[in-house]
Image (cartoon, grey):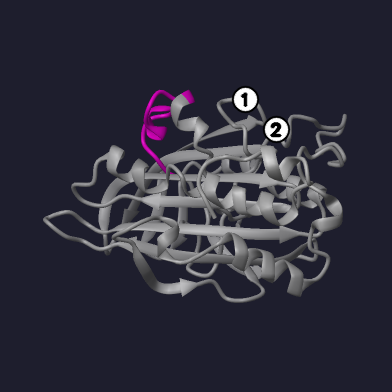
Amino acid sequence: MTYARALRVGGVVAACGGLLLSCTGTGGGGGSGSAPASSGASRSGAATGGATTSSGAPAAASATPGTDPAREPKTVAQAQALIQQVISGPELFGTGVRKASPYESQPGQWAVLGDDCLWRLEPLPGDALATLTRHFEVPAAGGKGAVRLSATVTVHRTALDASWEQARMLEEDLDCTEQTQRPGERLTGLQSLSFARGEGGNTSGDDLLLETGQCVSDTHGGPYPYWWQQAVLGSVVAGTSVCGGKGRSQQELNSLVAEVLPRMLLRVQQGIGSSAGSTSGTKGGGS
């Protein structure tokens, strides 16, 4: 089963030729925004920092560039404090974005993708200290439909636990090219990409996952472009997702999320980075 999250690294836009959606066509991935209202949604990564053991498991993640294990949260309270530092309100996405309803995920729960390709809420597993997903929207206006957005941050107990979350996601999503987020809402035509640090323009995270497809809703209509992006930095997994609306161009959607994940990763770096990494590492927006 897979966990739900979301992310986006700015360099990938250039690597894919301008718009993120041009990498694989239409956009989407059941990340945190695509998962049930109180979750975050993760994908999996065959490349968790690039290294695996002979059994296919991620290699022990003690060599995360730029992070300091001593600064990583050890308690739930510390993890929650870091999440509040990394994630913010609608200003995370820029002007014209507002809180959606429901706004925040339920404490102690996250979304899990089942073997039947349905997202369900389950208790947070023991390898995670805390998680939070926030949902946002660009209201319908000027003949254009609403755009739905999400941001998720999860803090694990160790960097290896975070790598495992990333690794599980892609494997399971490959078996679920169509997913049901909740009754009347689904994702279709999903395709996934994975980039280790230094690949595909990924210079901010230990590992980057992208998923593109389409979102369809009995209420909002569709299909519309949808994509989900998630990255790992140390023990933290962060991600974003976007679901388009009537009349919204891919360029318009991309402009909403292009700098969001880099900005979140910069805040992670500021929170748990080593003294060297925190001064010269992540770029992509101020805190």
In the image, 250 versus 258, the foreground residue is 258
Q: Which residue is mark 2?
A: 47
Q: Residue at x 17, y 54 (%)?
A: 144
Kindly identify the residue that appears in the image at 38 percent across and 70 percent down: 99
Image position of 15 (left or right of 45): left
Is the residue marked by circle 1 packed among few (<14), some (14-19), or many (20+) residues within 10 Å? some
Amino acid identity at mark 1? Glu
Specify few, some or many for label 2: CA neighbours under 10 Å numbering under 14, 14-19, or 20 or more.
many
Overall secondary structure of the magenta stretch? loop
Residue 282 in view of the camera: yes
Residue 135: % across, % down: 44, 65
Q: Which residues are magenta?
A: 15-28
How many marks the image carries: the answer is 2
Residue holding disc 1: 199
Say whether residue 95 is left or right of residue 164: left
Taking the image as shown, residue 223 lies to the left or right of residue 9, namely left
Q: Dot 1 lies on which element?
A: loop
* Residue 111 drawn at (x, y percent): 59, 63
Residue 138 lies, in percent from the top left, at 29, 60
Residue 76 occupies quadrant: bottom right
Q: Which residue occupies 56% across, 52% down?
A: 264
Q: Please name the residue shown 54% across and 65% down the image.
A: 133
Q: Please state, as top left, top right, bottom left or bottom right, where the C terminus lies in the image.
A: bottom right
Label 1 – label 2 distance at C-alpha: 10 Å
Could you tell which of marks 1 and 2 lies nearer the N-terminus? 2
Give residue 281's quadrant in the image.
Answer: top right
Q: Is residue 286 magenta?
A: no
Dots 1, 2 in contact, CB < 8 A: yes
Residue 227, above or below 91:
above
